Image (cartoon, rainbow, N blue to C red):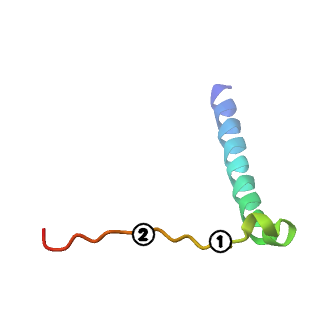
């Protein structure tokens, strides 16, 4: 009885993992078509000054 319950829980967990992976793949492929702003790269230029200390 307990063995059957544990096996059912393991199967349910594996099914949920597979469904989550399929959902992530679907979002990665279809997401840019449905939500283009979420997948767009930032369009602003970032300039930061740096100081190189050579010879110390």
Tally of numbered discs: 2
Circle 2: element type: loop
Closer to the observer: label 1 or label 2? Answer: 2
Q: Is residue 9 above or below residue 14?
A: above
The residue closer to the viewer here, 6 or 19, is: 19
Image position of 49 (left or right of 54): right
Mark earlier in primary sequence (1, 2): 1
Nearer to me, 46 or 2? 46
What residue appears at the point 69 percent right and 30 percent down from the top-left corner?
5
1 or 52: nearer the viewer: 52
Q: Residues within 10 Å of mark 2 (few under 14, many from 20)?
A: few
Above/below status of 18 relative to 25: above
Name the residue rendered at 87%, 67% in the picture.
34
Where residue 6 sits, quadrant-wise, is top right
Seen from this angle, which residue lies furthest right?
34
Which residue sits at x=66%, y=69%? 42
* Quarter of the C terminus within the rendering: bottom left
Q: Is residue 20 above or below residue 51?
A: above
* Percent coordinates x, y for residue 9 in the rendering: 68, 36
Residue 14 lies, with reference to residue 50, above or below; the image says: above
Q: Residue 1: give x, y in percent of width and height.
A: 68, 26
| Callout 1: SS | loop
Q: Residue at the far left: name it.
A: 56
**Location of residue 53 (image quadrant):** bottom left
Image x and y of residue 54, in percent: 19, 73
Q: Which label sits on residue 44? A: 1
Query: Residue 27, located in which quarter of the rendered image?
Result: bottom right
Residue 49's mark? 2
In the rendering, at what x and y percent does residue 32 appear?
79, 71
Marks 1 and 2, how far apart at CA? 16 Å
Query: Which residue lies at the image location 68% right of the left edge and 73% below the top edge?
Result: 43
In the drawing, does residue 10 fall left or right of residue 49? right
């Amino acid at each position: 009885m307990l063995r059957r319950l544990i096996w059912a829980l393991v199967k349910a967990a594996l099914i949920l993992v597979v469904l989550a992976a399929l959902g992530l793949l679907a979002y990665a492929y279809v997401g840019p078509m449905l939500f283009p702003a979420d997948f767009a790269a930032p369009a602003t230029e970032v300039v930061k000054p740096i100081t190189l200390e050579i010879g110390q």
